[in-house]
């Protein structure tokens, strides 16, 4: 009979800090880790495209900018807030998966 090694939850969190999905893979949930890694790459690619569209994002022009520029900037801010919440969930999920 094979002995199952106990996973360290904080190592899973540390690995997910380095690369989202790596903590889940460490915990043995390879499909979830791969899905999280792929979604992270998609979100990062979207953020890069948004940054290029905004041309660098200078906050001082936001109050006087036309409505459509303000909309894109505020959408960008909401996007990063959402991304932060998702990232916190990924860390929590890595911890929970390794427990």
Image (cartoon, rainbow, N blue to C red):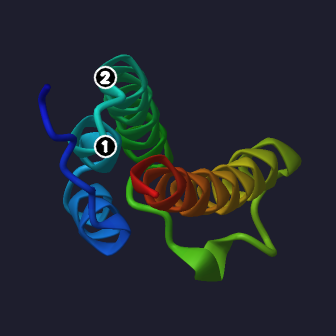
The number of callouts visible is 2
Q: Which mark is residue 59?
A: none
Q: Which of the 4 image quadrants contains residue 70?
A: bottom right
> Nearer the observer, disc 1 or disc 2?
1
Look at the picture and state if 79 lies above or below 31: below
| Residue at the extreme right | 67
Percent x, y of residue 32: 43, 25
Task: Tell me the residue at 22%/60% (across/down).
Answer: 15
> Residue 54 at x, y = what percent?
50, 48
Instruction: Check the picture and name the quadrant holding the N terminus.
Output: top left
Say whether residue 57 is left or right of residue 64.
left
Q: CA distance from mark 1 to mark 2?
A: 12 Å
Residue shown at 36% from the left, 17% from the top: 31
40 relative position to 19: left or right: right
Marks 1 and 2, the one that precedes in the sequence: 1
Whether the residues at callouts 1 and 2 have beta carbons within 8 Å, the answer is no
**In this view, 20 is above or below 63:** above
Residue assigned mark 1: 27
Secondary structure found at label 1: loop
- For image coordinates 87% across by 49% down, the residue present is 67
Residue 94 picture location, percent across and down: 43, 53
In-front residue for pair 74/39: 39
Residue in front for this viewpoint, 28 or 58:
28
Residue at the bottom extreme? Answer: 60
Give the crowd class for mark 2: few <14, some 14-19, many >=20 residues within 10 Å: some
Identified at 34% across, 23% down, the residue is 38
Q: Which residue is mark 2?
A: 34
Secondary structure of the residue carrying tag 2 is helix
């Amino acid at each position: 009979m094979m002995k199952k090694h106990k996973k360290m939850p904080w190592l899973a969190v540390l690995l997910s800090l380095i690369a989202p999905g790596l903590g889940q893979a460490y915990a043995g949930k390879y499909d979830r880790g791969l899905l999280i890694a792929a979604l992270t790459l998609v979100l990062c690619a979207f953020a890069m495209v948004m940054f290029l569209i905004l041309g660098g994002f200078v906050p001082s022009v936001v109050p006087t900018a036309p409505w459509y520029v303000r909309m894109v900037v505020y959408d960008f801010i909401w996007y990063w807030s959402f991304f932060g919440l998702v990232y916190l969930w990924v860390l929590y999920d890595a911890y929970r998966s390794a427990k």
